[in-house]
Amino acid sequence: MFHLKLDDINERCRRDPAGFVAQSEQSYTNVIESVAERICENRCERTILLLNGPSSSGKTTTARRIRDAIARRGVESHSISMDDYYLSRHTYEVPKDEEGRNDLESPLCMDLPMLSNHLAALCKGETIEVPTYDFMRHIRTGETHEVRLEKGQIAVIEGIHALNDVLMAKVREYSMGIYMAVGTQVVLSNNWRLAPHVLRFVRRAIRDKNFRDSPVSETIDMWRSVRRGERLYIHPHVSSADFLMNTYLPYEDCILMNQLRRDAEPYHQEMERAGLEDLVRALDRFEPLEDLSLIPEDSIMHEFIG
């Protein structure tokens, strides 16, 4: 795990914000390019690319940038959404968590055996019929589209269950796994640190407000459930990954913290009850970075701030 001192972050933001952003973004680009190079080198033996990570890890942007980097090297890829393998809601009993709420993050909500069979078929050069899921009606529509891998092509699958043992059972030797998450702690003092999952909460709270019409209070309310799903369904499979990618940008909380501070002010007690007491104390500690034009168009930051 990486560690960054808050004093260093604030100093770099004050002294040279443009250079701070550029250096942070270039470091992340270098990681993507390195991973893409390894994927292309192994594409004939490893034709399945599995992308996994917890909430607000920047999976969508990182997956797209990896596909673009692969394409620049002359390798074609096909994207398969795990979301299309959800089971129709009326065909099974939705699992419940300890509080009796629907556990929609459970792998039991998905047809992982079907997806595993489909990936195994792709590895054999066969054509598969990928289903389509309608999230408005919570059903599989019956519509499908064909996917077939030509020699040297790669199938890219992204989702929170991408490294699940059920999914990997038939394709382990033909696949490469990438686990992406915030892998940085921000150190404010000797006994005061912001853990990676706290930094992801900040991302999610801003994203949900900007893109999902969900106020900060709702993100706080569901955070314990999100963390439970991560512990049960994601963390046990991290060891299956071939690559671990830290998606944290050192400058990001100079933007995100200061956006969250205003919206979170009425909910400090709720945040503390959700295990976010360290965050409450840190909301006003980050130097503001206000010039958003410094952020590149392909930055992971746009998943959260637009």
Image: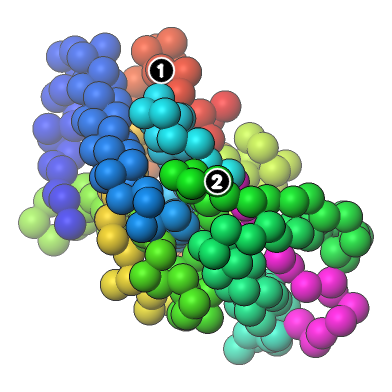
Q: What element carries label 2?
A: loop
* Residue at image point 47% right, 18% down: 297
Q: Is residue 141 visible?
A: yes
* Magenta segment includes 81: yes
Residue 102 image point, x, y percent: 72, 78
Quadrant for the N terminus in the image: bottom left
Residue range (magenta):
79-94
Answer yes or no: do the residues labelled 2 and 1 have beta carbons within 8 Å?
no
Residues under labels 2 and 1: Cα distance?
34 Å
* Residue at image point 28% right, 56% down: 243
- Image-based side of 104 in relation to 158, left or right: right
Q: Dot 2, how many residues are within 10 Å of its Cα: few (below 14), some (14-19), or many (20+)?
A: some
Residue 154 image point, x, y percent: 48, 48
Disc 2 designates what residue? 150
- Image-based side of 306 in relation to 181, left or right: right
Q: What residue type is labelled 1?
A: Pro
The answer to whether 262 is drawn above or below residue 279 in the figure is: above
Quarter of the view holding residue 276: bottom left
Tell me the tag on residue 296.
1
- Image-based side of 191 in relation to 220, left or right: left
Q: Identify the coloring.
A: rainbow
Residue 115 image point, x, y percent: 63, 69
* Residue at image point 63% right, 61% down: 126
Taking depth in this image into account, of 176 and 123 the one nearest to the observer is: 123
Quarter of the view holding residue 244: bottom left
Residue 132 image point, x, y percent: 80, 56
Q: Dot 1, how many residues are within 10 Å of its Cα: few (below 14), some (14-19), or many (20+)?
A: few
Quadrant for the C terminus in the image: top right
Q: Which amino acid does label 2 sit on?
A: Glu
The answer to whether 3 is drawn above or below residue 62 in the figure is: below
Q: Earlier in the sequence, mark 2 or mark 1?
A: 2
